[in-house]
Amino acid sequence: MSYFRTVLLVAAKDLRTELRSREQIVTLLFFALLVLVVFNFAFDFTIIDFVSLGGGILWVAFIFSGVLALGRSFQIEREQDRIQGILMAPVDRSAFYLGKVCATFLFMAAVEAVLVPVTVILFNFPFGPRVGAALLVLVLNTLGFAAVGTLFAAITTQTRRGELLLPLLLFPAAVPLALSAVRSTSHILAGRPFDRYSSWIALSGAYDLIFLTTAILLFDYVLDE
Amino acid sequence: MTGPAVAIRDLEKLYGPVPALDRLNLDIVPGEFILLAGPNGAGKSTLLKTLALLVRPNAGSIHLFGEDARRGDRTGLRRRIGLLSHQTFLYDHLTGSENLVFFGRLYGLEDPQGTAREAIRAIGLEGRGDDEVRTYSRGMQQRLAIARAFLHRPDLLLLDEPFTGLDADGSDRLEAHLRAVRDGGRTCVLATHDLPAALRLARRVVVLAAGGILADRPAAALPAAELEALVRAAARPGRGAPHPGMGAARPDAGPGARP
């Protein structure tokens, strides 16, 4: 079976499972919405400018809901030792990794697709003409988070307290990405020109490339007993 | 093929300080059907998982079909191995057919849908193939797990307690299927506590105790009662102690037995 067909097969399996169970997407969505609502009540946005906090608020919601998605993604494989069924198959294990990255990316993107319009309504802040730049930032940073998160979720899934270990490993590694995401989102919300935050976007792109490449090269060893 | 299908040399696997496999040596010729017997903790499941390339041994070597399992083409070897474990490996929210098609595609089968349909029919689950696996009973899930393990027609079948959860019809079907596997010349290693059923199928019996081989004999030379006594004796501390039916105070010196 070709490499990319394996990637699609694994991603499609995860999406089909999720569409039937709706375990992840409902949890993710409610958690992320709750974060937005809490921030909306915590700050008085008639005094505080949303531009100064908006990037942070959005990415707190995205990242924390993403951790939930990652944990569940590998919990499914751990139950019934399903991961062993995958490991026994004559396929490149990095294709399994990329399939998982694709599925996590799509789950997070679905949450973001709901959350961004809700933010516009809740905080009364239209993105207006900056939609293209906002999309680029969302895609690059969500992909990076899914890439690094899937790698660490695979590592921690082999351990006894994997669900506790995952955020401990993931958050320090995701700091550059979180910084880049928050700063570039803040610049977009403030309506600043692209060259003011292009270096942050380049950082996200480089991060994605480094982690995806490293994970593809290392994943065979990550899943080894 | 001229060499053995499986050649194990001085295989050692430790879980912490405890040896699950203790300098084990075993040869299995192509087409051989082996019953792996032994008490709980004897190392049967670890041996099967090591042969399935899921567990990396601490020492020793395994050659599968003449290829070094550690350094050789592991992807190619995986294609030739089928494992039925204690767990089913099945996805609850996929249907029975979808599960088999998924694994069929992973193994690169030419017609995964057709193969899955045929497998569903062979295990007696026609009419339930389009239901989600979470709606299946334990026995039905076990049948499907068996179909998954056989799906790509592996050259080496590793079966760990395959009769678990099966009703009489399921056991009969599995036994008939395993008989066909044996007569078709495929290599099979079957670990089970259902010794009478396994003895009807196996041509050779290997009894494990504390990670080593306690006895290695032709199945025809080992009545069920004697085998059960052997396994019971192996479960007691100080394996190899005298027991009724064995008449000796030391392990068998069969082809794979340790000195």
Image: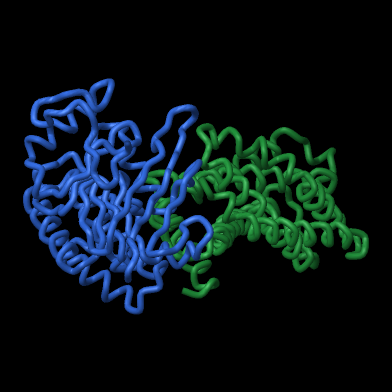
Image x and y of residue B74, in percent: 48, 62
Chain in green on the image: A
Lateral position of residue A32 relative to residue B5, left or right: right
Task: Identify the colour of chain B in the image.
Answer: blue
Q: Is residue B94 visible?
A: yes
Up the image or down, B54 lies above or below A94; here it is above
- Dividing the picture into quadrants, the one containing residue B150 is bottom left
Lateral position of residue B186 relative to residue B127, left or right: right
- Number of numbered discs on residues: 0
Observer-nearest of A201 and A53: A201
Lateral position of residue B180 relative to residue B91, left or right: left
Identify the residue at horizontal 15%, vertical 54% (top origin).
B203
Up the image or down, A156 lies above or below B84; here it is above
Observer-nearest of A100 and B168: B168
Lateral position of residue A145 relative to residue B255, left or right: right
Observer-nearest of B212 and A162: B212
Identify the residue at horizontal 15%, vertical 66% (top origin).
B183
Image x and y of residue B37, in percent: 22, 40
The single residue placed furthest to the top in the displayed view is B237
Image x and y of residue B246, in percent: 12, 31
Identify the residue at horizontal 56%, vertical 58% (top origin).
A97
Up the image or down, B253 lies above or below A24; here it is above
Q: Is residue B126 visible?
A: no
Q: How is the image coloured?
A: by chain
